[in-house]
Image: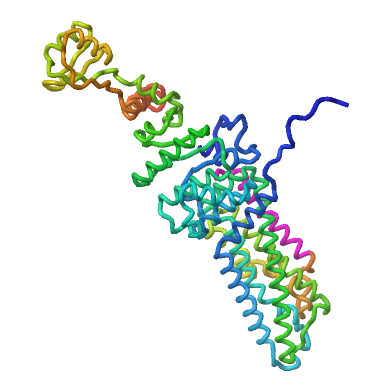
């Protein structure tokens, strides 16, 4: 993200926003809003004054300052020094700063880091709302469960390399086992019927089965045909976290074999 | 007449004036700016007052030869040089230490433009403040000297106006040099140490290295060339102070070198 913003220079390659490097944007804050680190304020400056100097730099009307303060709920503390702010308040101020130029592209680095549950919920809804307004919201996070609630599309990067780029649903489905949890008082008969139908069945307890190889509708149809009772039928999707772990594990596993020169035994030969 | 009409409106983009306004707003919205200014005014006038007072009631022989009423009344600009150096360094190092530099780069990613806007604002503020103080210091000194019956100067006295104006500019130049150190080191402590080293330590050390080299140091140029209006007795041509214009140009060159190195690093380095 720092490289997208032109803060750090990449060793190779370029990052473009709407086809342009960040440094060539006409009005950067009106085109891209970013929250890279929450503490990028002078602690002795009041919140409103922080937003004012930002607004002046890109000729954004000063009235917009109070608008974004309102939007993030900080208008009552606008005159207070930023150094006295709690983490949640600085995070909100960072989001206000990102929204100052009403940009179409937003970059948020770890936006929920260190927030309390209420703050996390607020940020989550806020990001969803911004996306609904038609903006591109680019969020980085290592809180995978949080991302599964927020994101539409995923980019997984491991050790500086792109591992995958896909939608959350695809990502989970691809890594998921496609199993169905079945709770039934007729576990015995059901198990036999399912095996006959070609599924592999595992019994988790007396009345609970894990079925692989058949979908929920197929199991339901089968139950109707044979007159078997169903108390619960739930597709088991892998969580985003499971999917992520699976994917990055591969990444770590094949790495040593692609870099033989780091292997001391290989180096001796 | 061509029927083709340009579809792209003149493409406006952020400019020097926007960034400069932003810089001014940043400086004015910190209470520490007001505190620094206030303390600097007090220190300047206090030093001038004490030194001018100390020059009163001497034997007539004291005033007969080499007495420089203008130079005495500008002594208060020495603490201003220190304050200016600290302020100049802080202008940039506080941005790095607080992290404000990153939103600044985000708002104005063209770093050469950002550098020149920062430099222009810093220079403007320094020159205005230092000139005001230089004149205030001069007038206070002359009031005390003439009130105490000692010889005094006016702006019409030979060299006096030149000395007052040039002292203000010279101290601004020193503050900008410190701003350059801030760009190079990015840390307040390191930048102020470099500035203090050049201004206060180098003159002490240089006496032991080369007496002839002393006159090329910023501090000595300030006191002996810029502030002075009367040739001091007893100096051979080898150790005579530089003439004001030469001394000023030399220090302008020092400051330019420091600023050029700082600007290069500022433009190239990761934020």
User: In this orientation, which residue lies closer to the viewer: A173 or B151?
Assistant: A173
**Residue A148 at x, y percent in the picture:** 37, 31
- Relative to B171, is B96 on the left or the right? left
The part of the image, by quadrant, that contains residue A126 is top left
Q: How is the image coloured?
A: rainbow
Residue positioned most to the top: A196
- Taking the magenta stretch, the answer to whether it contains residue A222 is no
User: In this orientation, which residue lies closer to the viewer: B86 or A33?
Assistant: A33
**Residue A194 at x, y percent in the picture:** 19, 10
Check the picture and name the quadrant holding the N terminus of chain B: top right
- Counting labels gives 0
Residue A266 visible in the current orientation: no
Q: Which residues are magenta?
A: B246-271
Residue at x-position 20% and y-position 10%: A224
User: In this orientation, which residue lies closer to the viewer: A174 or A129?
Assistant: A129
**Residue A222 at x, y percent in the picture:** 22, 9
**Residue A155 at x, y percent in the picture:** 44, 28
Residue positioned most to the right: B1
- Taking the magenta stretch, the answer to whether it contains residue B262 is yes
Residue at x-position 77% and y-position 83%: B66
Above or below, B223 relative to A94:
below
- Relative to A145, is A97 on the left or the right? right
Residue A3 visible in the current orientation: yes
The part of the image, by quadrant, that contains residue A10 is top right
Q: Main secondary structure of the magenta part?
A: helix
The part of the image, by quadrant, that contains residue B3 is top right
Above or below, B57 relative to B197:
below
User: In this orientation, which residue lies closer to the viewer: B150 or A73?
Assistant: A73
Check the picture and name the quadrant holding the C terminus of chain B: top right
């Amino acid at each position: 993200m720092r490289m997208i913003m032109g803060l750090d220079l990449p060793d190779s390659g370029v990052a473009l926003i709407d086809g342009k490097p960040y440094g060539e944007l006409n009005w950067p804050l009106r085109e891209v809003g970013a929250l890279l680190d929450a503490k990028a304020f002078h602690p002795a400056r009041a919140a409103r004054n922080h937003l004012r100097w930002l607004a002046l730099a890109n000729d954004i009307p000063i009235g917009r300052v109070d608008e974004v303060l309102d939007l993030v709920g900080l208008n009552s503390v606008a005159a207070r020094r930023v150094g006295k702010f709690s983490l949640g308040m600085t995070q909100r101020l960072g989001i206000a700063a990102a929204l100052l130029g009403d940009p179409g592209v937003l970059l948020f680095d770890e936006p929920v880091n260190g927030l309390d549950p209420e703050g996390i919920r607020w940020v989550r809804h806020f990001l969803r709302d911004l996306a609904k307004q038609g903006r591109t919201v680019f969020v980085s996070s290592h809180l995978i469960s949080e991302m599964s609630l927020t994101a539409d599309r995923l980019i997984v990067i491991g050790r500086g390399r792109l591992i995958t780029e896909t939608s959350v649903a695809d990502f989970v489905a691809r890594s998921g086992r496609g199993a169905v949890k079945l709770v039934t008082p007729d576990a015995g008969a059901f198990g036999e019927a399912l095996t006959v139908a070609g599924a592999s069945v595992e019994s988790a307890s007396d009345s609970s089965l894990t079925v692989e190889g058949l979908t929920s509708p197929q199991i339901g149809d089968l139950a109707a045909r044979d007159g078997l009772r169903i108390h619960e039928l739930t597709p088991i999707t892998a969580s985003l976290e499971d999917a992520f772990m699976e994917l990055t594990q591969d990444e770590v596993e094949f790495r040593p074999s692609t870099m033989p020169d780091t292997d001391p035994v290989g180096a001796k030969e | 007449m061509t029927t083709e009409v340009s579809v792209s409106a003149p493409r406006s983009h952020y400019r020097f004036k926007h960034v400069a306004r932003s810089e001014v707003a940043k400086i004015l919205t910190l209470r520490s700016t007001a505190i620094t200014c206030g303390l600097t005014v007090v220190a300047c006038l206090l030093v001038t007052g004490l030194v001018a007072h100390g020059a009163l009631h001497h034997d007539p022989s004291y005033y007969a030869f080499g007495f420089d009423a203008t130079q005495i009344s500008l002594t208060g600009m020495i603490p201003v040089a220190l304050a200016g150096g600290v302020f100049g360094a802080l202008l940039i190092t506080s941005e790095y230490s607080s992290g404000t530099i990153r939103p600044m780069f985000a708002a104005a990613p063209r770093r050469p433009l950002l550098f020149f806007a920062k430099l222009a604002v810093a220079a403007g503020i320094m020159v205005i403040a230092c000139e005001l103080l230089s004149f205030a210091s001069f007038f206070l000194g002359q009031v005390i000297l003439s009130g105490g019956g000692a010889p005094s100067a006016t702006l019409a006295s030979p060299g006096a106006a030149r000395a007052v104006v040039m002292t203000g500019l010279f101290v601004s130049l020193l503050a900008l040099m410190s701003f350059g150190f801030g760009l190079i080191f990015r840390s307040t402590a390191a930048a102020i140490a470099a500035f203090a080293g050049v201004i206060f330590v180098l003159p002490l050390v240089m006496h032991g290295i080369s007496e002839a080299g002393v006159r090329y140091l910023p501090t000595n140029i300030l006191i002996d060339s810029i502030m002075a209006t009367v040739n001091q007795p007893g100096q051979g041509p080898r150790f005579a102070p530089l003439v004001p214009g030469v001394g000023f140009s030399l220090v302008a060159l020092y400051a330019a070198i420091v600023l050029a190195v700082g600007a290069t690093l500022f433009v190239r380095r990761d934020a």
